[in-house]
């Protein structure tokens, strides 16, 4: 890997440009999503492309060209040779069919079968400190372009709308957030409330009481300690999201100033709601999952869109059902349509009734959700997702003690009392 010694500019000075469907570019469905120009020892140089169209794409004859270099600068999908010429390679043929919403992650060529970095279908050129990549179709027309300057080891550039934004990977969340040029307001708010160091600095333990919601939540996952050091998942509102929020919170058409934002008495609660327990990658979270935030355990509901979008909902929570079993079990037992569950707020106090998230009554159709513009940025103590909305904390409900039991514990208890091992069937009259 080529190492550069030039360190005169900070990360915020990294200039990252994208050419997206401009007059000289063909209509792009396959796009660059991320480029890691220089690894940091634990990582390799990486190029990620994705099919954001609604049809599969055959990449035979497609190429990636490093236009910042003269010669020795082309990668051909499906295989190439040492002279950078297209040459079909049998074991690279599965790198030419890109399904809708599918990603390809490309890394440097390495033909050593005994190497941990063995990659016979990788790219043969170096990325490095400065560069510009062009994605070309089978007619050798450019369909997408990304460029960067002054890339530091471990700095990746991520697509965010029509631009690319630099992020430092695999540092702690505090460092990743502070160095991100689109998260400056979020970083200032976290610092002003003390959350940045208390929660997001690597190695900092959080102590909690034995009977607290946090203790109960962690115990369900087998965690027995009285402190927690991460990992965390952070939904970080962009600077544009904070601008919208400050405009929304202003009086008589005026916009809050940054000083007024930082002085908001509820700011700490708002920020804690954007931090959830565990390391939750977008691909690993099921639709309509309720993630547990650090704002008293209030749920952040996560949804997946039809076209692969990743959304968060700040008003989709399970008001615990008035029984010993809880919403997850009521949904599994197909009780969601019963009048006592769907009571329109009569007793639940929620317009959608009890168990609205578990019963699938929440949607993102009316603009209630925030969208992740960038997701799955790895950190040493968690993962970072950049969202386009500042979320306001949903209500946090205390579940009855018996509802903290696991599904297996409930099953065993009911089996013992009924003498059957078919609890679900029993409750549904089978």
Image: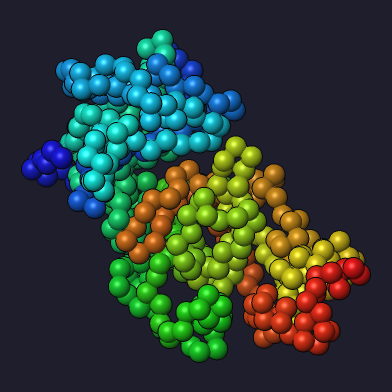
Front-most of 375 and 421? Answer: 421
Q: Outermost residue, bottom direction?
A: 210
Picture layout, residue 251 above or below residue 409 = above
From the viewer's perspective, is 160 left or right of 109? Answer: right
Q: Quadrant of the N terminus?
A: top left
Front-most of 390 and 329? Answer: 329
Picture layout, residue 216 above or below residue 80 = below
Q: Residue at x 67, y 86 (%)?
A: 401
Picture layout, residue 182 above or below residue 382 = above
Percent of width and height locating residue 228: 41, 77
Q: How is the image coloured?
A: rainbow
Residue 228 seen: yes
Front-most of 111 and 71? Answer: 111
Percent of width and height locating residue 174: 32, 62
Q: Residue at x 32, y 75 (%)?
A: 204
Residue 393 seen: no
From the viewer's perspective, is 289 left or right of 222? Answer: right
Q: Quadrant of the C terminus?
A: bottom right
Quadrant of the rendered structure where residue 121 is? top left
From the viewer's perspective, is 419 left or right of 101? Answer: right
Q: Residue at x 70, y 61 (%)?
A: 357
Percent of width and height locating residue 419: 82, 84
Percent of width and height locating residue 79: 33, 24
């Amino acid at each position: 890997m080529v190492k550069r010694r030039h360190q005169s500019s900070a990360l915020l000075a990294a200039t990252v440009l994208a050419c997206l469907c401009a007059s000289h570019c063909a209509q792009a469905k396959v796009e660059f999503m991320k480029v890691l120009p220089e690894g940091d020892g634990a990582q390799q140089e990486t190029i990620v492309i994705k099919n954001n169209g609604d049809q599969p794409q055959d990449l035979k004859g497609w190429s990636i060209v490093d236009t910042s270099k003269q010669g020795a600068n082309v990668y051909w999908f499906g295989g190439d040779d040492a002279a950078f010429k297209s040459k079909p390679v049998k074991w690279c043929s599965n790198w030419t069919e890109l399904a809708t919403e599918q990603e390809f992650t490309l890394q440097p060529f390495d033909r050593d079968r005994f190497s941990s970095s063995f990659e016979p279908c990788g790219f043969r050129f170096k990325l490095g400190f400065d560069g510009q990549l062009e994605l070309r179709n089978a007619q050798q027309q450019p369909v997408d372009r990304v460029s960067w300057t002054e890339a530091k080891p471990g700095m990746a550039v991520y697509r965010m709308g029509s631009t690319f934004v630099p992020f430092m990977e695999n540092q702690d969340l505090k460092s990743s957030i502070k160095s991100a040029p689109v998260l400056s307001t979020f970083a200032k708010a976290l610092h002003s409330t003390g959350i940045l160091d208390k929660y997001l600095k690597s190695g900092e333990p959080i102590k909690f009481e034995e009977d607290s919601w946090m203790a109960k939540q962690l115990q369900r996952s087998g965690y027995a300690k009285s402190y927690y050091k991460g990992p965390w998942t952070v939904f970080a509102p962009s600077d544009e999201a904070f601008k919208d929020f400050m405009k929304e919170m202003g009086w008589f058409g005026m916009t809050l100033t940054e000083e007024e934002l930082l002085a908001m008495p509820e700011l700490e609660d708002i920020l804690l709601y954007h931090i959830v327990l565990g390391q939750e990658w977008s691909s690993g979270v099921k639709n309509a999952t309720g993630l547990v935030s650090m704002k008293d355990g209030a749920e952040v509901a996560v949804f997946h869109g039809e076209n692969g979008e990743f959304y968060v909902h700040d008003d989709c929570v399970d008001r615990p059902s008035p029984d010993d079993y809880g919403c997850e079990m009521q949904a599994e037992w197909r009780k969601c349509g019963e009048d006592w569950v769907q009571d329109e707020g009569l007793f639940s106090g929620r317009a959608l009734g009890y168990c609205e998230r578990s019963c699938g009554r929440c949607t993102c159709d009316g603009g209630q959700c925030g969208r992740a513009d960038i997701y799955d940025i790895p950190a040493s103590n968690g993962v970072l997702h950049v969202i386009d909305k500042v979320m306001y904390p949903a209500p946090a409900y205390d579940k009855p003690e018996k509802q903290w039991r696991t599904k297996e514990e409930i099953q065993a208890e009911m089996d013992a009392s009924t003498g059957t091992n078919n609890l679900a069937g029993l409750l549904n009259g089978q």
